[in-house]
């Protein structure tokens, strides 16, 4: 498992994005925004991401700026803001 600062990983490799939303909460989600969570601290968000990637060769990417969490069934793609 790796902790990266930029989202320059291949689309085939599992990846979790970690960042803050527009309200300042910490977000963890996959690229497709199908799995994820909202966290009170960066430590909690990173712990969740590490536990989610413990079984495989996945990348955790720290997203600069704003990252939104949309787990609705109609979410067509990952969304960033700010």
Image (spheres, rainbow, N blue to C red):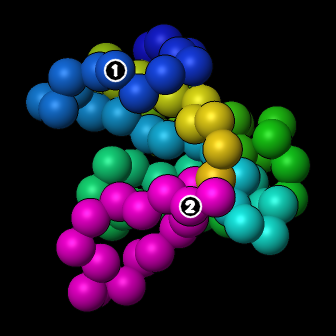
Q: Are marks 2 and 1 in contact (CB under 8 Å)?
A: no
Separation (CA) of disc 2 from disc 1:
18 Å
Instruction: Check the image and report above or below for 30 versus 76.
Output: above
Q: In the displayed structure, does residue 36 sit left or right of residue 43?
A: left
Q: Is residue 71 above or below residue 57?
A: below
What residue is disc 2 on? 81
Mark 1 = which residue? 8
Rendering quarter of residue 12: top left
Q: Main secondary structure of the magenta part?
A: loop
49 displayed left or right of 54: right
**Residue 75 lies in magenta, yes or no?**
yes
Marker disc for residue 68: none
Is residue 29 highlighted in magenta?
no
Front residue of this view, candidates 52 and 79: 79
Question: Residue at the spot x=37%, y=85% of the render?
Answer: 72
Crowding around mark 2 (Cα neighbors within 10 Å: few <14, some 14 to 19, many 20+) is few
Mark 1 lies on a secondary structure that is loop
When asked about the image quadrant of residue 49, the answer is: top right
Residue positioned 34% across, 20% down in the render: 8
Q: Quadrant of the C terminus?
A: bottom right
Q: The N terminus is located in which quarter?
A: top left
Indicate the secondary structure of the residue bearing disc 2: strand
In the foreground, 17 or 58: 17
x then y, percent, for residue 53: 43, 32
Judged left or right of residue 70, residue 23 is right
Q: Please rate how many residues cluster around mark 1, counting C-alpha atoms within 10 Å: few if below 14, some from 14 to 19, many from 20.
A: few
Q: In the image, what residue occupies the spot 53% across and 16% down?
A: 4
- In magenta, the rendered stretch is 67-82
Q: Position of residue 23 (x, y in %)?
A: 80, 70
Residue 30 appears left or right of 75: right
């Amino acid at each position: 498992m790796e902790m990266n600062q930029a989202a320059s990983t291949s689309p085939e490799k599992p990846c979790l994005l970690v960042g803050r939303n527009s309200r300042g909460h910490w977000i963890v989600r996959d690229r497709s925004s199908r799995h994820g969570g909202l966290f009170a601290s960066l430590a909690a968000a990173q712990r969740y991401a590490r536990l989610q990637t413990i079984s495989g060769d996945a990348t955790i990417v720290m997203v600069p700026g704003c990252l939104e969490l949309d787990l609705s069934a109609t979410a067509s793609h990952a969304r960033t803001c700010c």
